[in-house]
């Protein structure tokens, strides 16, 4: 497996509230994760950093996962615990009151991928059947789309597009949506914050991910294009490529 992470401030913001990374254990299983922080002043930075540091530390201590059930339970329990850690910290520090973050995480084993998410940071899978969004946004506009009140095209331009219905750390006992999917040699997984998905269409993402280029090159191209289209938000992505080998992934943190 190969893996790569990249983040960028964007064109407008002078600081980055996103965080993330790709973390490879000794057994070569990969954890890829993106967190898009929110809150006043620097509180978003605090929330996203807490999530990534906590998840990375726990990941590097855990034994190899051999079944989807193990992986799903670990992701569910770990994110639940981290949610309450962030919530408690926010309540104990006035400058962090109300802070929170999205999270999307994918554990990539040889035969399967287990994905967990809270918020509107996304996971996509490229395989022989095409390019598909694996996660479903926890957002107001997505609820309106699901209820049939607006179309998916209308959702792209809705004035309340960035309103989340669920975020990590904003309430106690928030649970992630967790699922497992299969994957095969040649497949790629993309995780990203909305700084990318709001600027690059699904068809354009697919075209970029399909390139026979290095993950670093693909990542740079996507971030450059998001910036060329305004770059109003921080932009983060993680790519994992199942090349059929057990080589360690590379990361840029």
Image (cartoon, grey):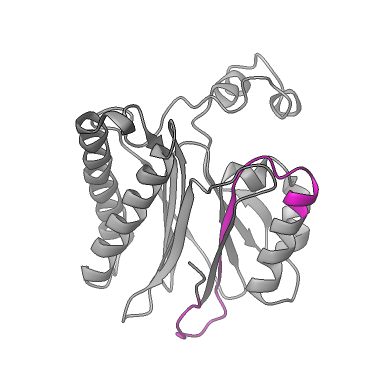
Q: Position of residue 134 (x, y in %)?
A: 54, 47
Relative height, residue 94 to residue 221 (above, below): above
Q: Quadrant of residue 239?
A: bottom right
Who is closer to the viewer here, 161 or 72? 161
Q: Quadrant of residue 89?
A: top left
Query: At 63% from the left edge and 44% from the top edge, which residue is drawn?
Result: 195
Q: Position of residue 155 (x, y in %)?
A: 69, 25
212 left or right, relative to 195: right
Residue 227 forms part of the magenta stretch: yes
Residue 214 forms part of the magenta stretch: no
Query: At 22% from the left edge and 42% from the top edge, which residue is drawn?
Result: 85
Relative height, residue 130 to residue 155 (above, below): below
Relative height, residue 26 to residue 84 (above, below): below
Query: At 77% from the left edge and 54% from the top edge, which residue is drawn?
Result: 225
Residue furthest toward the top? 149
Q: Give the magenta range.
A: 225-250
């Amino acid at each position: 497996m190969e893996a790569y992470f990249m983040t960028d401030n964007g064109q407008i913001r002078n600081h980055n509230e996103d965080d993330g990374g790709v973390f490879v254990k000794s057994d070569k299983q990969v954890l890829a994760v993106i967190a898009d922080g929110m809150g006043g002043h620097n509180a978003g930075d605090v929330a996203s950093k807490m999530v990534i540091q906590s998840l990375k530390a726990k990941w590097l201590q855990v034994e190899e996962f051999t079944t989807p059930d193990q992986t799903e339970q670990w992701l569910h329990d770990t994110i639940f615990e981290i949610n309450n850690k962030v919530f408690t910290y926010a309540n104990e520090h006035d400058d962090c009151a109300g802070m929170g973050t999205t999270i999307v995480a994918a554990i990539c084993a040889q035969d399967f991928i287990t994905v967990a998410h809270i918020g509107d940071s996304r996971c996509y899978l490229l395989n022989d059947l095409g390019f598909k969004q694996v996660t479903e946004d926890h957002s107001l506009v997505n609820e309106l789309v699901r209820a049939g009140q607006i179309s998916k095209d209308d959702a792209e331009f809705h004035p309340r597009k960035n309103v989340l219905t669920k975020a990590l750390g904003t309430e106690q006992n928030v649970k992630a949506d967790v699922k497992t999917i299969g994957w095969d040699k040649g497949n790629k997984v993309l995780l990203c914050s909305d700084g990318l998905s709001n600027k690059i269409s699904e068809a354009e993402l697919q075209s970029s991910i399909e390139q026979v280029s290095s993950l670093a090159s693909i990542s740079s191209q996507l971030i450059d294009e998001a910036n060329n289209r305004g770059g109003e938000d921080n932009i983060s992505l993680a790519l994992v490529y199942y090349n059929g080998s057990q080589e360690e992934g590379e990361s840029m943190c």
